[in-house]
Image (tube, rainbow, N blue to C red):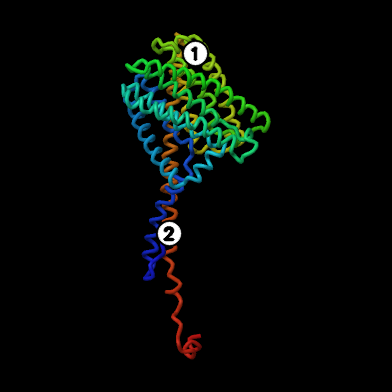
Amino acid sequence: MSRAPAGGSGGRLVSLTDTAGTTGVHEAVRTLHPGYFALVMATGIVSIAMHNHGAYPLSVALLWLACGAFAVLLIVTAVRIIAFRADLIADLQDPRRAFGSFTFVAAADVLGTRLAVDSHYRIASALLLVGWLAWLVLGYVVPWTACLRTTHRPVLKYANGTWFIWVVASESVAVLAAALEPELETGRRELALLAVFSWSVGVFLYAAAGIFVGARMLLYGLKPEDLTPPYWVSMGATAITVVAGARIVEMAHAPMVDATRGLVAGTSVVFWAFGTWLIPPLIAAGIWKHVVHRIPLRYEAPLWSVVFPLGMYGVGGDYLGKADHLPIVESIGAHESWIALAAWAITFVAMLHHLATTLGGSASRRSTRAARSSSCPDSSASTPPASADPSSASHQH
């Protein structure tokens, strides 16, 4: 805060109100959750779901929202890297938050998949390249910083649902590669290899994340406040594995696809069944936390990690039902897509209210305090001037 001019309090009021308007944004950028790109993931997958069910105007509107959110988050993340590097490094070294960084990979790939639906193949290919490179880099950096170089010990004690986002990132690369493979004239074999490779790695990563998170529950127990929204990603990871598998099954003939088509199709059905089985305990966990223990349900960035699995489950059921000729699975996916849309709408309204309260509310509160402090006279003005004559001072006393 700048110093007030010596001539009065007007300059001080202007300085206080100016900084009040920026402090909320400053703090929001500094404390940005690394998993906030789940907003783009959720919006993109609900847009795909609406397109699959013929709600084209709504799907396009959601696509534009996803593009805008992706651009804003890119800018804010870039500012955070430059201005708040220490906070960013702290997040990468925290096993409870570091794996949220993989939401950037999934956001780029989900957005690219939606753009590919409208035949924007060049942009989708660019997003695939960005997502794949980020997946490679983060796939080695995050486990190193969050598990091997962290000061949080034992690391297993801090394993949570965000670890499954690594799986989602891997499978999202497979989904976009499989979506582009039939549409491009060149690079089809490379895209087929990338799709099968990423899908296979994601399957093994799901097993690893499941073992780590399961061991954490058995060894250290769970408190109600430990059941954060990203635990829903355990179901979302199975759903995107189903989508990736279904898209691989539908791909054109390629050596890698022909060698694994039957395996991928059968494994996708298994993952869909397991993901369906996970939904009741996840709902029960939410009831145990918010109803039994009365922990308030408030908006937070990880809530988008609930919306995305719902949308992905709906899209996964739709794709799997059509690819493997399973009408029951396709019908379940159709109904789930509309549930995901409702969840998205509620969360989006809650986010807008949260942003208005956090950014606008903090600025107004600081402005009010600044106005109150400026309304009080300066101490120099309220204190009578000292007299140079001692007799005059005693007379006044």
Could you say whether the residue bearing mark 2 is in a helix, strand or loop?
loop
Q: Which residue is mark 2?
A: 1
Residue at the spot 44% in from the left edge and 38% down from the top edge: 351
Q: Is residue 245 visible?
A: yes
Residue sitting nearer the eye, 383 or 217: 217
Residue sitting nearer the eye, 68 or 187: 187
Identify the mark nearer the N-term, 1 or 2.
Answer: 2
Amino acid bearing label 2? Met
Q: Position of residue 72 (x, y in %)?
A: 38, 38
Could you say whether the residue bearing mark 1 is in a helix, strand or loop?
helix
Q: Position of residue 222 (x, y in %)?
A: 64, 33
Q: Which residue is mark 1?
A: 264
CA distance for labels 1 and 2: 60 Å
Is 267 rendered above or below residue 340? above
Residue sitting nearer the eye, 231 or 102: 102
Q: Is residue 58 visible?
A: no
Residue at the spot 48% in from the left edge and 13% down from the top edge: 329
State which quadrant residue 115 falls in.
top left
Is 326 rendered above or below residue 239? above
As drawn, the residue found furthest toward the right would be: 219
Query: Mark 1 and 2 residues: CB-CB less than 8 Å, in contact?
Result: no
